[in-house]
Image: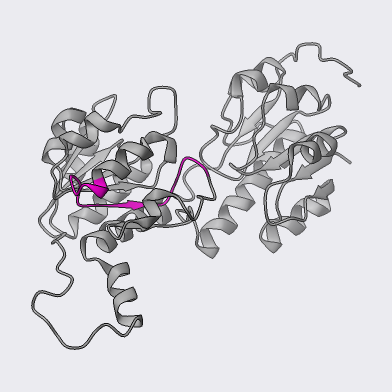
Amino acid sequence: MKRVYLTRRLPEEAGQRLAQAVELEIWPGEVPPPREELVRGLEQADGLLCLLTDQVDASLMDAAPRLKVISLCAVGYNNVDVPAATQRGILVTNTPGVLTETTADLAFALILAVARRLVEGDRFTRSGAWQAWDPGLLLGQDVHGACLGLVGLGRIGQAVARRAQGFAMEVIYASTSRKPAVEEALGVRPATLTELLARADFVSLHVPLTAATRGLIGREELARMKPTAFLINTSRGEVVDEEALYAALAARALHGAGLDVFHREPVDPGHPLLTLDNVVALPHLGSATGATRTRMAQLAVDNLLLALSGRQPPHPVNPEGWGGNPVARSGERP
């Protein structure tokens, strides 16, 4: 049987299916395995099933001479050195599509939460501070009829745009390419990033983390936004300059932010952004429903088992790594 190292327990059905098909070793902890544990666990492994929190670089691959597939239980894959994997004949797979609607739900939930001050209202009520109905109490901003700016119009961005239709929102988007069919179907219109930032009441980020998008929203970009606007980030923390965001929010140069992702996760409880009452902060819950996480796990297992059996899986990140000729690696064993 093929040997697989799993960096976190999966939902029961997916985990059982994997355990029946391979010789499986599971890291039992609730936090990511330390580097030395990954090195040890991959010494004899043919496959790795991991999460975004597990850093898989070239040196780790070199310590795993039998490794043929890295299956991510995630859509993003910025934690894996994909070119290094391709060079070594290692296939990388991911789980796109299954979390689109669930993540779009959360993005819209953050829009509503920050606009209507839901978290502040919950704290206020629980604290006993609510003494009477007050016409000036915790006034928020309307979502219906507002302008929503989508930075990126992939699967999730389009799903958010569909939700915005129910709120009669004007939707504009900035993307590296025009999408005329989507524009017609969803009633959205293109804009440059500069135009979008200046126009939108809500700026929602839906881009992958790449060299081009790292730090995409920095001090200059935040300064272009309306002081009444909100920033929503359910993509990757590194897309936003957190220091610049804190400065803008603290100075009330930006009205608020809804954040599901951070540069470092878990975020430090003492992080400056968490001291602000105009920030709603979540622990990376974009795909966090039981049904969606189960589908993600099942797809990750499908990708892994198909690749290990010599069949091409449905979602390769680096198709050129499929059936490639790995470079000679130190200590490689048959």
Tell me, yes or no, if residue 223 can be seen here.
Answer: yes
Number of numbered markers: 0
Q: Residue lying furthest top in this view?
A: 328
Q: Residue at x 26, y 59 (%)?
A: 114
* Residue 257 is a magenta residue: yes
Q: Is residue 146 above or below residue 321?
A: below
Q: Quadrant of the N terminus?
A: top right
The answer to whether residue 261 is magenta is yes
Please state the horizontal and vertical placement of residue 136, each as a whole percent of the image.
Answer: 10, 74
Magenta residues, start to end: 249-264
Q: Nearer the viewer, residue 60 or 66?
A: 60
Q: Quadrant of the C terminus?
A: top right
Q: Residue shown at 31%/85% (left/top)?
A: 128
What x and y, as percent, mark residue 11? 66, 60
Image height of 262 relative to 174, above or below: below
Percent coordinates x, y for residue 285 in the rendering: 47, 56
Q: Position of residue 54 (x, y in %)?
A: 65, 40
Of 282 and 312, which appears nearest the observer? 282
| Dominant secondary-structure state across the stretch colored magenta | loop
The relative height of residue 294 versus residue 301 in the rendered view (above or below) is: below
The front one of 310 and 67 is 67
Q: Is residue 14 above or below residue 118?
A: above
Q: Can you see residue 207?
A: no
Q: Quadrant of residue 43?
A: top right
Q: Is residue 324 left or right of residue 167?
A: right
- Residue at 54% x, 50% y is 266
